[in-house]
Every structure is written in C-alpha cells, then in structure tokens.
Amino acid sequence: MKAALSSLFAILLFPLCGCGKENDGNMAAPALEITIGDISSGSATIAYEQRNAETVYALISTREFPEPDAGTIKEEGVAGADGLFFFEGLKSGSAYFVYAVAWNGQQHSAVHSLSFIAKDSPPEVYPWEKERSGPRIFSDITLCPGGNTSKSPYRWDEKRFAPHVSYVDKGGREHWLFEAFLGIEGEVQGRNMVMYIGTSKTHKSADKECWQYLLDYWLGPGGCVAALDRQIAAVKERIGEPPTPRQFVLVAPDPIKYQVFTDPTSSTTYWGSISGRTLDFSFVQDRIRAYLWYMDRAREMWDELSPKNIEFAGFYILSEDLVATPDGWNYANKQWDIILEEVHEHLDNRNEGLYWIPYYMASGYNIWKRLGITMAWMQPNHYWDDAGVKNMDSSFGAMRRFGMGMELEFEYSMVLEVMKRGLKGPDAEGNMTYTVEDVPMLRERFRDYMEWYRKYGLYGVNPIALYSGSNALYQLYVSSEPEDREIYHELCQFIINSGLREK
C-alpha cells in the first residue's frame, strides 16, 4: 500500500463501481474522481478531483447502499474542502463505504464510491527483528515436510533432524550441515484440505483452523521447531558454535479464493473471521488480511517460544507458480502481484524475508525480485523426467540469468535399502512406477544436478535447496548399504564445500 501506515490501524482500499447517472442539460455536467489519501490514527482522508462543480459532498457509512442517492449524500454528507474529506472516529476491523457526488446548481455528477476496511495495525517489531539490518540470506536450505497426518513419520524430532543439522565425514569429523530449515506442508489429510492453489475437485481449501493447526505443529511449545532447537544445541556442545546463525523458514498457506479452487460457485467466505468479521476471499484485500494474520500470528508464537539456537528468517510462498500479470492463467483468482506487494512491505518493515521455489520454468520465475521475494530457487524436476522434456540448459540458464538457486531433488526411490523392500516410487505424474531396478538411473539423474550446477558456474555462487521427499535424507543416513552411504557422503560434501558459505 502506498498510504502511510503510521498509526493504530491501516486501511485496505478496493474501488467499487461508480453508480448513478450524470444529469442531462445544456451546461457541462459535473465530473468527479475520488481516491484514498493519507491515513492516521482513527481517521481516513479521501482525496477528490472535480470538474464543472461548485461543491463535492461525501457520506461515509458502515453499510453498503444498493442504489446510492445523490440527494441523500448532499443532505446527510459533508462538504469537501481543498480537494479532501477527512473522517474521524473509525473503528478497527470495520468495513466502511464512502459515497461522493459533485454538484453544480441543479446538476450533479455520477455517484462515486470507495470501500475500505479499517484494521488493527500489525504488532510492533520484535526485539529479535530490530537487531537485523534486513532479511536473512543463507547459502543452503533443506525442506522438511511436516504436518500431514497421512505421512509417516508424522513429527520431526531431534533424531529425524539430526542428519540435516550436522554431518560426520568418512574421517569421523563432524561438520555443520544446512544453514536453514524450511518447515513445509501442503495438505491436512485428516480433514481432506489443501493449503495450495491446485486443480483438485475433491479437496477443500484449508480454513483458518487448519492454518492455526500448522502453526501449532511447528511453533507450539511441543512443536517441531522446539525439537530442532534442541538438536542444534546438542551439536553445539560437541563442535561449538556454527559459523553463521541457523535459520528457520515457515511455509505460508495460499489464501485460496474459493473453498474448492476449481469450482467458482463454491464459497468465498469459508475461511473464517478476524476481529469478529467473516472474511470474503472474493476480495483480494481479505485474502491479504488472512495472509498477514497468519504471518503475524507466526511471529507472535515464535516470540513466545523464544528458541535459543535458531533464528526466524521469514515465510515460504507455497504456490509454485506466481501468476502476476493480467494475461496469466487464472490471474483474477490469484493476483499475486497485488498480494505480494503488500506482504513484502509488511515483512520488509520487520526485517523478515519471503522465499520461493517454483517448479520448472513456472510463471513468475523471471520476475521474482520484482515481486519482493528475498531468495528464490528453481526446481529442475530432472529426477522424475522420464520423457526428457525438462531441458537442463533452460532451467540452469534461467538460474544464472535471474540469480536463482537450484533445488537438488531426490526421494526414497533412490535409497537402495528402502527399495529392496519391494516398494515402488512415484514418477512425475505420481504413478508408482520406479522399482529397485531404477535406483542406478535415479542416482545418475541426482548426480546430474551437481554436475550441471558446476558446469554453469553456479556452485559456490548461487544458493542450494535440498528436496529429499518426506524422509529420504534420513534414510540414506541410517542405511547399511554401501552405495547409499557413498551417495550420502557425496551429497553432504557438495553442501559443505560450497564456497558461498565463505562469502
């Protein structure tokens, strides 16, 4: 938002259509345009420009008039002065409707209207945010999917975090491994809800209760971040302080317009309420409001948890494509440019970052910096590319051109000890087709990532993100198969030897 946000509340503006008709007559009819002006504590300023008029009147109300009447606005409203209206005594969390009309004798302009929501200001900047000079940047991050009740293991504890936090090399020396950890999840299987914009016709969009569930899973007193904090503390006791502070990034669920995204007749008021008002996701401002509620609640819970060995870096954008231009697919139902402008401003003022990993050449990959994102990585998706359609030159060329990192990808289907049990692994379409015979092929694809990152001159220059499915890094770590152990060492050496850690 361009308006100053310097007081107890902020105003989210969205225009309504002008309504009414300008009077016919021989004289030029009055014309009017109104826009949001500045805001301050408990008040709002509406600016106007008029032509062919003597006076402009405006009426503010907490209810929407179906057919605003120019005469009523003149009789019950107030007259503007010097191109401004100033309204005081506004209540946080309430919706307001402003109707204005320009008059010249017996003629008047069309009635013009604006609607806004007065909301509580975000919490003050926390002390641990004030200590920073800006959003956190790191050399590598590991994805830790958690919170889906259908997955096993379900919870991240110290044991499960261990191979992500540190690495013991072949000589017995322990090293710090990943600098950052991403708590990520897209589904709440027990409630048949999804947190990402997708094409499912059976899953409902996650509501406020689900969003809070995800916060509790990660940031509650007995949550997974507390376990991560304890594991980092244990490693500190053995090898001392890490060279840089460890960071945690939390996923932010997509604010999905419809209760079922693929069904535009489904509810837009399914999510829940804030400050006693039910949000309507047909308005992008209400989707922004829910997004910011989640982020401020996460920051509040982090402050209450107060981990001693890990910092809160910010939020991960769950949507893997960011349709941000009107000609993009389904733009009207996404509007990421509008959402991220305000979210970026909100977080930047608190030294928090926005992080994102699009799939192969997904919408927005070439404008991620313009959208206010702090760091971005691309998924080459090569690991599952049986058809050979994910061109490596395209993805790595895009990484180099647009300053993106690489997501290094593999799943349990590469772990020989696991696949020997007769399991099958998913291909790009989710079909369970990979068998133990495919393990050598999948390992070569995995090694291709590291080879191409070096080939394009990105290793030690751009950051790395690791996707290892739900638990595959741990499975490599505990495997008794020599081939699994060898590729585990290759992976960890690739992470710790990146020259980016020294920059």
Image: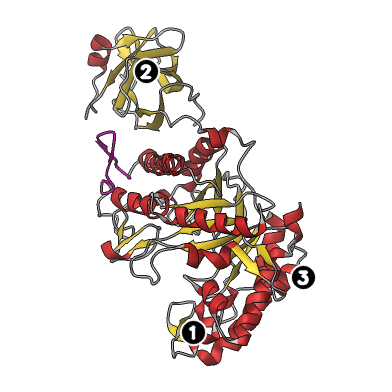
- Is any atom of residue 256 visible in this view? no
Q: Earlier in the sequence, mark 2 or mark 3?
A: 2
What is the crowding at mark 1: few (fewer than 14 residues within 10 Å), some, or many (at least 20)? some
* Residue 190 to residue 91: above or below: below
Q: Is residue 390 magenta?
A: no
Q: Say which amino acid is labelled 1.
A: Val
- Residue 100 occupies quadrant: top left
Q: Is residue 276 magenta?
A: yes
Q: Name the residue at 48% across, 62% down.
A: 158
360 or 481, which is in the foreground?
481
- Residue 262 occupies quadrant: bottom left
* Local secondary structure at mark 3: helix
Q: Earlier in the sequence, mark 1 or mark 3?
A: 1
Magenta residue span: 269-281
In x, y percent, where is residue 168?
A: 65, 70
Q: Name the residue carrying label 1.
A: 418
* Local secondary structure at mark 2: loop
* Residue 51 to residue 182: above or below: above
282 or 349, which is in the foreground?
349
Q: Relative to residue 171, is residue 231 drawn left or right?
A: left
Q: Say which amino acid is labelled 2.
A: Gly
Q: CA distance from mark 1 to mark 2?
A: 61 Å
Q: Name the residue carrying label 2.
A: 42
In x, y percent, where is residue 30?
A: 39, 16
Q: Name the residue at 49% across, 40% down.
A: 343
Majority SS type along the magenta span: loop
Q: Name the residue carrying label 3.
A: 455
Q: Name the residue at 52% across, 52% down.
A: 249
